[in-house]
Amino acid sequence: MKTTLYWFSGTGNSLWAARHLAARLGETTLLPVAGMRTAPLPPSERVGIVFPVLAFGPPNIIMEFCAKADLPPSAYLFTLCTMGGLAGAPHGRLRRILRARGLDPAAGWSLTMPGNCITLYPPPKESRQRRLFERAARKIERIAEAMREGRRGRFEDSPPPLSWLGAGLNPLAMKRFPREDKRFSATERCTRCGLCARVCPVGNIALEAGAPRWGGRCEQCYACINWCPAGAIETGWITRGRRRYHHPEVRAQELCLRAPDKTPDAHEQA
Ligand SMILES: Cc1cc2nc3c(=O)[nH]c(=O)nc-3n(C[C@H](O)[C@H](O)[C@H](O)COP(=O)(O)O)c2cc1C
Ligand code: SF4
Ligand code: SF4
């Protein structure tokens, strides 16, 4: 049975989860959501949408994808989020969007992974990260089994009242998020390597004399902050001196959806 997994990922957790699930299912195509939001899908009997929870719900790009993508109505459709531990209501929000289009998702799973929201907290220690990866891998086995049996699963949002809180807060945050990149800046540690621009899934970073400039179309995935090899990107004082995080089995290149020569220049984006 053919499966397509659409993924969106800032620091690799969701890409790792998608890859892990693909290996358990076989015959799976992995496609990045970024840049392919309305492209027709390859024929598949199962379609999954894999993404990180941001502010108790799905990222803007995932909601847009669910609203517009050419998804086959007869497929076994599911959502799978990775999160730092407090899901809120990501699956409920997406389910409503999909149902309004006559699509009927079968399940919504949530995986706890290391939190990458370094404006709020530092990443967990490596020993804790390893335990989270092992636990997530075991859960992915169970998800793959449920999918092979075509089971309709649970939608793993937080229980009320946290899901209500998530459903209320996420739309407010998503409205603000595109312009929240005004808090980002590159310090004197910047070596002008250009990686932040390449790793940004939505091409929101232009290089101005080699240094990043943000464009106000941010998804707040924190890829740029976490992948910068010099630790040069800060959001004010809050991230200073804080360790950065990315999934240890994912390389920055795997998240670079743009060819290096296509990295937008400041004047191109202006
Ligand atoms: C701006 C931002 C907001 C986040 N909000 C939440 C949240 O509300 N609940 C949660 O459990 N994790 C939250 N996280 C953590 C991510 O969901 C989690 O680390 C996820 O696995 C990252 O996946 P990725 O590496 O594929 O981007 C947030 C992360 C960021 C950057
Ligand atoms: S990744 Fe870091 S060092 Fe490289 S250009 Fe961006 S801010 Fe500068
Ligand atoms: S600018 Fe940074 S945080 Fe915003 S979408 Fe791009 S990589 Fe993610």
Image: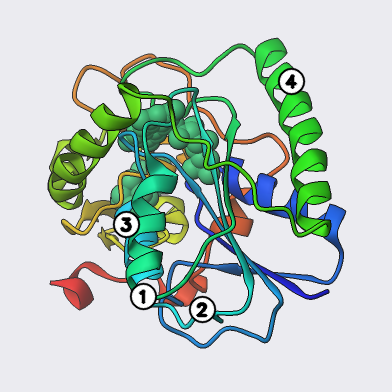
Q: Which amino acid type corresponds to the residue marked 1 in the rendered image?
A: Arg
Q: How far apart are marks 3 and 4 (CA)?
A: 36 Å
Between discs 2 and 4, the one toward the N terminus: 2
Q: Which mark is residue 71?
A: 2
Q: Distance between the residues labelled 2 and 3?
A: 39 Å
Q: Distance between the residues labelled 2 and 1?
A: 10 Å
Residue 41 visible in the current orientation: yes
Q: Which circle, 1 or 4, is nearer the viewer?
A: 1
**Rendered location of residue 228, percent (x, y):** 45, 40
Viewport quadrant of the N terminus = bottom right
Q: Which circle, 2 or 4, is nearer the viewer?
A: 2
91 versus 86 height, above or below:
below
* Residue marked by disc 1: 101
Between discs 2 and 3, the one toward the N terminus: 2
Q: Which residue is drawn at 21% across and 67% down?
A: 266
Between discs 3 and 4, the one toward the N terminus: 4
Q: Which amino acid type corresponds to the residue marked 4 in the rendered image?
A: Arg
Q: Which circle, 2 or 1, is nearer the viewer?
A: 1
Q: Which circle, 3 or 4, is nearer the viewer?
A: 4
